[in-house]
Image (tube, helix red, strand yellow):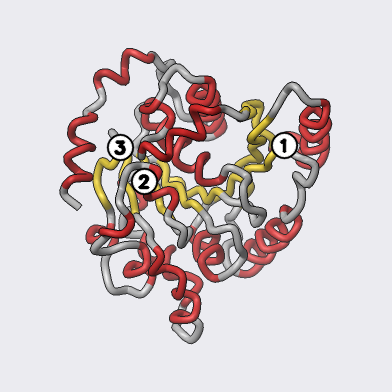
Amino acid sequence: MGKIISIGNQKGGTGKTTTTVNLSAALVEYGQKVLLIDSDPQGNATSGVGINKNELEKSIYELLLNKASPEEVILKNVCPGMDLVPCNINLTGIEIELVGALSRETRLRTSLKQIKEEYDFIFIDLPPSLGLLTLNALVASDSIIVPIQCEFYALEGVSQLLNTFNLIKENLNPHLTIEGILMTMADFRTNLTAEVINEIKRYFNNKVYASIIPRNIRLSEAPSYGKPISLYDTNSIGAKKYREMAEEVLAANEIIYKPFNCKDIDKMDINNSEESKKSI
């Protein structure tokens, strides 16, 4: 299948990295082969799966500059069944370095063509900006998932992102679609959350996922341990909600899956992924 999906929102703090890491891990639990691409110079998706971003030999930086092939950059099995194109602070200056380069907006798409069919899903964690990195990701993608925080300024920044989406669709990637809208950080104890949910559903109609990610302490703790929530606390509400979202993504893409069983986690080759991290 090899579907490429960007995950992002120009507004920071919406849970885009949390969603990229945990949706990827959840889909692995349903038997999907997943590649996670970290294109945010902060490198939070990289550290979120236990990789020391300060010790990388190669990253997406070298990939975009055509100094390394995808095979040289990809870290295999960083979590059971999940590969990673990592990122670190070197990516900060990439936009200046590519400003005069040929085909600067299609660098990532060209690289991913070589490996796209090796994966069921490729997820790209976007930076919280609308620069050349986001442009490269959206040109390479089949669709985009937009996480929106359940707060007063929920739709702030989304209009600019959708404007960029439309421009790319019209000029560079006519096949780009909106995969879905995900509501995150919901606090169901407040009336505001319900109001925001209703507003988002009115605005995006059937593009909104039924799964809503709540505020969850275990979910916020997991990155500091370098694990997705499914490995950090498999029975937490955060893990369950991302599994629900994974089921929606699979159903929307007409992929038949076997219902998840927590006992399956014991069968995953966790030791192999740990050895992958030690080899960096």
| Label 3 secondary element | strand
Binning the other alpha carbons within 10 Å of mark 2 as few (below 14), some (14 to 19) or many (20 upward) gives many
Q: Which residue is mark 3?
A: 79
Judge whether 100 appears above or below 239 on screen.
below
In x, y percent, where is residue 250?
Answer: 50, 30
Q: Which residue is mark 1?
A: 150
Q: Which residue is mark 2?
A: 35
Binning the other alpha carbons within 10 Å of mark 1 as few (below 14), some (14 to 19) or many (20 upward) gives many
For marks 2 and 1 on the same chain, the one whose residue lies earlier in the sequence:
2
Judge whether 101 appears above or below 172 on screen.
below
| Label 2 secondary element | strand
For marks 2 and 3 on the same chain, the one whose residue lies earlier in the sequence:
2
Number of numbered discs visible in the structure rendering: 3
Indicate the quadrant where residue 159 lies. bottom right
Q: Quadrant of the N terminus?
A: top left
Indicate the amino acid at tag 2. Leu
What is the distance, in whole Å, between disc 3 and disc 1 at their CAs?
A: 29 Å
Judge whether 182 appears above or below 42 on screen.
above
Q: Nearer the viewer, mark 3 or mark 1?
A: 1
Binning the other alpha carbons within 10 Å of mark 3 as few (below 14), some (14 to 19) or many (20 upward) gives many
In x, y percent, where is residue 7?
Answer: 55, 48
Viewer-side residue, 37 vs 49: 49
Q: Nearer the viewer, mark 2 or mark 1?
A: 1
**Residue that appears at 51% across and 35% down:** 220
Viewer-side residue, 163 vs 148: 148
